[in-house]
């Protein structure tokens, strides 16, 4: 397959065909796969479910974070990152063969990648002119939508073999859209808009069912006055009383292939603790202290619980599970001002 992301085409491995996608049974396997920037070299590192660590020998741009997704081929994955030397979007799969797409990504911003229900992947990023760029394994390019400087988009799959993106536009207004366009998100039943905190980026995830115009999506937003703001089954923004640490982003965690409800994680202002909130168990203070300026990553694992990875104040990666309610230090050193990315691997039969 050929992906035309920006100006350069890259050859990628074949994925599940759209015609066959819904004939497959999809099961989350093992624990999640992790991508992060090494704390000493800045190199992109991949941690497999078995604990094996792979150094890709490609450096992630300082101040940016990789994004990883599990593909609908058993054990396969794809990672997107801003490469330090070229400042381009690079892609890499389980074959560890890096591909330069030739597409420029704005400084201090990170790409987002997701797997669609037809087996293809889709990438979104803040590209030339601070425009939102989107691309898949077939085509892509400039959407013409403005994205605020220094912010990054987020992307998630829908049930109809497509995707939805959220990003911060002019005036810090949060927008949502797919392949055919979009619009700003209503703040309440009477209209208005949702505004993000200066420099923050929203996070979107697919909830079982996958329709983003019904009760099956989740968006987490670091809102005005640093309040945590969530959009789940109402298509309206619901601010909470929880306060998010300045300079950080929230993470939404759900999975359209499981029955896990929408959840979100964030670094709490003041004490810097990882906070996990979901519709099943409410809000939990993990007691795990995060590195200042860092944001969590979360994903659904095979037992239907949420795993969160954080850049902790120890300078190492910690994992926390909302079932065991325990934090575990991995001992892996992570670069400052970057965040890990976590994804579920699937068994497809």
Image (cartoon, grey):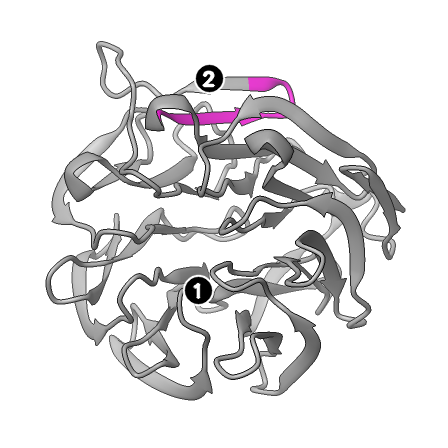
**Of marks 1 and 2, the one in the foreground:** 1
Q: Residue sitting at 40 percent across and 65 percent down? A: 337
Q: Is residue 44 above or below residue 130?
A: below
| Tag 2 residue | 183
> Which quadrant of the figure has residue 185?
top left
Q: Secondary structure at mark 1?
A: loop
Describe residue 275's horizontal placement relative to residue 241 as left or right.
right
Q: Is residue 180 above or below residue 245?
A: above
Span shown in magenta: 173-181
C-alpha distance separating marks 1 and 2: 28 Å
Q: Quadrant for the C terminus, please.
A: bottom right
Q: Position of residue 86 (x, y in %)?
A: 72, 57
Q: Label 1: few (<14), some or many (≥20) within 10 Å?
A: many
Q: Residue sitting at 54 percent across and 62 percent down? A: 343
Describe residue 74's horizontal placement relative to residue 218 as left or right.
right
Describe residue 119's horizontal placement relative to residue 269 as left or right.
right
Describe residue 194's horizontal placement relative to residue 114 as left or right.
left
**132 and 3: which is toward the camera:** 132
> Which mark, by number, is residue 89?
none
| Tag 1 residue | 339
Residue 19 appears in the picture as rendered: no
Q: Residue sitting at 18 percent across and 66 percent down? A: 272
Q: Is residue 238 above or below residue 105?
A: above
Q: Position of residue 81 (x, y in %)?
A: 63, 58
């Amino acid at each position: 397959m050929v992906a035309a992301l920006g100006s350069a085409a890259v050859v990628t491995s074949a994925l599940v065909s759209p015609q066959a996608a819904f004939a497959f049974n999809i099961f989350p396997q093992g624990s999640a796969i992790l991508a992060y920037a090494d704390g000493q070299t800045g190199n992109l590192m991949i941690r497999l479910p078995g604990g094996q660590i792979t150094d890709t020998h490609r450096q992630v741009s300082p101040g940016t974070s990789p994004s990883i997704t599990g593909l609908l081929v058993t054990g396969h994955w794809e990672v997107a990152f801003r490469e330090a030397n070229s400042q381009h979007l690079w892609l890499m799969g389980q074959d560890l063969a890096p591909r330069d797409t030739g597409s420029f990504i704005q400084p201090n911003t990170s790409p987002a990648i997701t797997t669609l229900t037809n087996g293809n992947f889709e990438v979104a990023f803040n590209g030339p002119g601070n425009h939102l760029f989107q691309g898949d394994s077939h085509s892509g390019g400039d959407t013409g939508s403005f994205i605020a400087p220094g912010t990054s988009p987020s992307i998630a799959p829908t049930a109809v073999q497509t995707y939805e993106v959220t990003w911060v536009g002019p005036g810090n207004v949060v927008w949502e859209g797919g392949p055919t366009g979009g619009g700003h998100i209503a703040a309440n039943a009477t209209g208005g808009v949702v505004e993000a905190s200066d420099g923050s980026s929203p996070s979107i995830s697919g909830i079982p069912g996958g329709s983003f115009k019904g009760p099956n999506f989740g968006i987490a937003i670091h809102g005005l006055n640093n309040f945590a703001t969530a959009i789940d089954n109402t298509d309206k923004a619901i601010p909470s009383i929880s306060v998010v640490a300045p300079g950080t982003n929230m993470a939404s965690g759900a999975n359209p292939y499981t029955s896990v409800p929408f959840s979100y994680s964030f670094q709490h202002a003041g004490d810097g603790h990882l906070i996990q909130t979901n519709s099943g168990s409410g809000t939990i203070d993990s007691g795990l202290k995060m590195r200042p300026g860092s944001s969590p990553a979360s994903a659904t694992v095979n037992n239907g619980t949420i795993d969160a990875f954080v850049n902790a104040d120890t300078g190492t990666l910690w994992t926390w599970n909302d079932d065991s309610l325990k934090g575990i230090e991995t001992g892996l050193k992570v670069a400052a001002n970057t965040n890990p990315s976590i994804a579920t691997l699937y068994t497809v039969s």
